[in-house]
Image (spheres, grey):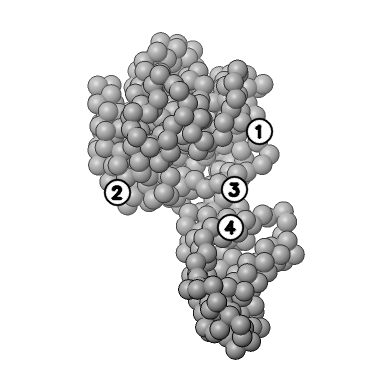
Amino acid sequence: MTLTQIKELAEKLAPRLIEIRRHFHSHPELSGQEYQTAAYLAGVLSSCGLQVREGVGRTGAIAELAGLGTDDRVLAIRTDMDALPIIEKTGLEYASQQAGIMHTSGRDIHTTVGLGTAMILSELAPSPGKVRFLFQPAEEIAKGASWMVEDDAMDGVTGVLGVRVWPKIPAGKVGIKYGALTAAADYLEIIIIGEAGHGGRPHEGIDAIWIAAQVMTTLQQAISRTQNPLRPVVLTIGKISGGSAANVIADRVKMVGMVRSLHPETHAALPEWIEKIVANVCQTYGANWEVNYTRGIPSVQNDLHLTQLVENAAVEAWGSPAVQIMSEPSLGAEDFSVYLESSPGTMFRLGVGLENGKNYPLHHPKFEADESAIVTGVVTLAYAACKYWQ
């Protein structure tokens, strides 16, 4: 009966949820600036009888359904809210009204799905324990989850569910991934310290630019021969700066980039591995070096039990053909992983692919989502929440 109720409520709410999503899409806000988004959803949630706390995680919000109190567990449902500094080129009638800002990562859908799930659960019989909705800011800069945790968003939480739109999956379907879903993403700074000299007498100096090139080449080659190919590592140097003039041997070069990995053991060993390679190259050519390796966010490791819970909920709701078991993780990062340091959890992929039309990737200025996916996401999350207490 509960699934039937959830589906009926979702279909009834669908026009309202599409209206809400279009409002969010038209009024995107950047990471850490989601004031109006949070105020809007707080108003909707309060009108549904939920207890709402604003200003959590700086610009986030929490809403809670108290439940019957017969179960001490707390289930959290997390959705994120921030947009990106990208000029929208979709031509939609509800396109962004904020110059240079766009919901091109689907968080207008995420927020709406979280809101719709809360609206539906508030209409059902109370659950044995608490359901806490986390509306998180600043996922795109990988800080919002930490801000929320610092404000006690995960206090008492025993399970957390998340959702991520995925244009490669058609609308009406969901993707389930067991184990690693996304990569750990760390920040890397390498400084090569050489010795300046005349460009016509390179043997009298220590060329930091040339040595930096050797470091980059060696790191990339070493990945293929010293790292387990079944445990991928992606090292990207995105910026290089150094040198002062065309005819002067550069005495200093700085390289900055990202290092991504999936497996915890590999992740733990990367700083020492990189330091050793940089040291060997620099020592060979007489340069000094600095390696500054900063841990970013860990990989999302989906909990087996909760992943099975969401899969079962989706299969019961939509049938087996609508559920895709994903074999490959993404080497993108997701700060949902920060919550998993406090509690087991799982995140599923929500298909938003268009049936007719080109499906542009996330972060593209022409990215569009099939709005029918909102109901799919809401029903899946709401039913999974109900099954959590069984």
Q: Is residue 170 above or below residue 86?
A: above
Q: Residues within 10 Å of mark 1 (few under 14, many from 20)?
A: few
> Can the viewer see residue 135?
no
Q: What distance separates the C-alpha of mark 4 from that of mark 2?
A: 33 Å
Numbered disc 4: secondary structure: strand
* Left or right, residue 59 beside residue 372: left
Image location of residue 98, percent across then percent down = 33, 33
**Mark 4: amino acid:** Thr
Numbered disc 2: secondary structure: loop
Residue ID at (60%, 59%): 235
Residue position for label 1: 325
* Camera-side residue of 94 and 100: 100
Q: Which of pointers 3 and 1 lies earlier in the amino acid sequence?
A: 1
* Camera-side residue of 248 and 159: 248
Residue position for label 4: 236
Q: What distance separates the C-alpha of mark 4 from that of mark 3?
A: 12 Å
Residue position for label 2: 151
Numbered disc 1: secondary structure: strand
Residue position for label 3: 331
Q: Is residue 57 above or below residue 62?
A: below
Q: What distance separates the C-alpha of mark 2 from that of mark 3?
A: 29 Å
Numbered disc 3: secondary structure: loop
Q: What distance separates the C-alpha of mark 1 from that of mark 4?
A: 29 Å
The reply to whether discs 4 and 2 touch (Cβ–Cβ < 8 Å) is no
Residue at the far right in the pictured view = 225
